Every structure is written in structure tokens, then in C-alpha cells.
Amino acid sequence: MTQWIGWLRRLDPAVPTAMVSVLASEGSAPRGAGTRMLVTADGQQGTIGGGQLEYRVVDQARAMLCHAPGTWRVQDYPLGPLLGQCCGGRVRLLVERIDPQALDWLHDAEPGRMLSTRFEPDALARAVFERETATRQSARGDKPLPGTRIVEPVGERPRPVYLFGAGHVGQAIARHMTGLPLQLAWFDTRPEQGRIDGVSMVAEEDIAACVSEAPDDAAILILTHDHPLDYHLTLAALGRPILPAFVGLIGSSTKIARFNSRLKADGILPEALSRLTAPIGVPGVFGKEPDVIAIAVCAQLLQLRGT
């Protein structure tokens, strides 16, 4: 996630600010490496998981505000014995007083790039590279010392989600995608739906081209107002030379059985047909309310991470 990059870009240089970064974690820890939050004298942005850990670290970060910009400390927290938490994990945190004069690297900080951080005695030197090999960090062992260099992804590349249909369920899915590592491309053929913020109105004869143009790592969600249109889009998705990462279709068991039969008759091979997820949503979540379906679908898309 790159939300913290936006926070730094909007930083008020007149307000002393500290940043807390999770360098590494192990076991059952509330957040993983790369999680960050900003702390000022009277507020904070983001979270590293709450509880006693965050309570203590916020105090430490506020104490850092009295030090010179660029000052940093690395602190290890064994969550169980030190903080009385039951999760039993361990985290290694970097706490730094932000130097507003040393943020030029933010201009190049985009998802997919690599961020290098070198620990200097009185500052952290950062730079962004197109290609670098990430360094593995540990929550145990020697802490970073001056001269140590770590490399991490700037942020996870959001998975493209091509959502076809702007009805009640489509709107709920779009709403619940906010803040997730998902990048929405949203389509409908009805002019009245084109007035919804974020929806692209596409003529019915052209909408299959949107499926063809989706990146190979895209998730395609098909839930239009019209069964023939749903079938047209499903056929286009499963007929691609390279199948998308995910093809999901909303519908009843009767609709899905009918579609499977037609898809076979139209030449869709069994391997491609097996990639169709229908109905969409994490199995075991029951309910036809749009928000229930939307949350189940978003959870299913998050299961694709790392694939």
C-alpha cells in the first residue's frame, strides 16, 4: 500500500512529524513489513495495529519530535512478554523524525519501483530505483547500524479490476474497494448509469473490447443487468488467448449451468471453463444484500494477492 507516500507528499513542513515504519515482523503480529504511520504532537495518520504496541510507539515517536530532523531509532518489540498481548509475535520498528528537506525521492516513488534506505549516523538517505533486489529483514538479530542499506518495494501494484455492471451490487463492490490494493475500471451500457461517479458508459457492441484490453493480471467481474450481455462478456473473457487472473460471474445455479453448457458449445475448452468462478464471492458467506455480496467479492479478490 502507498497511502503513506501521499501523506508525505502533503506534509506541512512547519509541523514536526515522525514516521513509524514496520521493518520486519514474525509470528502473529498485527501488521507486516512496510506498514507505516505518521505521528505529530496532537495526531496521527495510519496505524501499525493499535493496542499497547501502538500506544507505546506513539509516545516514542512524539519524544522523537524534540530531536533534530533526520534523527532515527530502531526498536524491537516482543509483543507477548513486553506488552502483555496474546498474539505472541515480534516486530522491529523504525522511528524517525521526518526531515522535510530530504524528501526529493518522493517525486519518483510509484508502485512497482524499489525504495532504498541507507542508515547514516544522523539521517536516513533514501532513493528510488526502477530495478533493485529487495533485502530480507528480520525481527531478530542485529539491528541496522550506520552504513546498513535496505531495499523494499515502494508499494504493491494494485490489481486491476474490470467491473461490468453498475447496479446495486456493482455500486456496493466499488464502494467497498476503497482503500484496498485494487484499481477499478468500471463499465455499464446504460446511459443513466454513466452518471455514477467512476462509471464509463460503453456501447453494448463495444463492451467486449474492454474485456480484451484488460491486463493479464486483471480480475474481471461480470454482473450486468442483462443475462445475454453477461454471457457475451463471459465468452469474451474465457476466449482470450491469455486468460485473465480471475473471471467471476454473478448468478443463480440455473443461470450458471445454462452458461456452462453454452460456453462448451461455443468452443470454450475445459481448462478455460474451469477458471470461471460462479457464483462470485467467498464460499460460505450467505445473503443477497448488495453489501454482503460486495464484501465477499472483495475478500475473494484479496485472496489473489501473490498470484
Image (cartoon, rainbow, N blue to C red):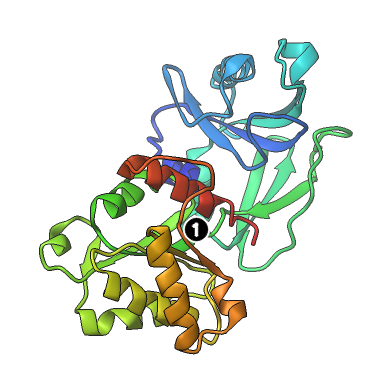
Element class at badge 1: loop
x 59%, y 52%: residue: 303
The image quadrant that residue 254 belongs to is bottom left
38 w.r.t. 113: above or below: above
User: Is 154 placed left or right of 247 in the picture?
Assistant: right
State the image coordinates of residue 108 (x, y, percent, origin top left): 51, 60
87 w.r.t. 296: above or below: above
- Residue placed most toward the observer, 100 or 228: 228
23 w.r.t. 51: above or below: below
User: Is 170 placed left or right of 82 in the picture?
Assistant: left
x 72%, y 10%: residue: 84
User: Is 194 placed left or right of 119 in the picture?
Assistant: left
| Residue to which mark 1 is pinned | 158
x 39%, y 40%: residue: 287
The image quadrant that residue 188 belongs to is bottom left
State the image coordinates of residue 30 (x, y, percent, origin top left): 64, 29
Whether residue 162 is visible, yes or no, is no
State the image coordinates of residue 206 (x, y, percent, origin top left): 26, 83
- Residue placed most toward the observer, 165 or 213: 165
User: Badge 1: how crowded within 10 Å, few (<14), some, or many (20+)?
Assistant: some
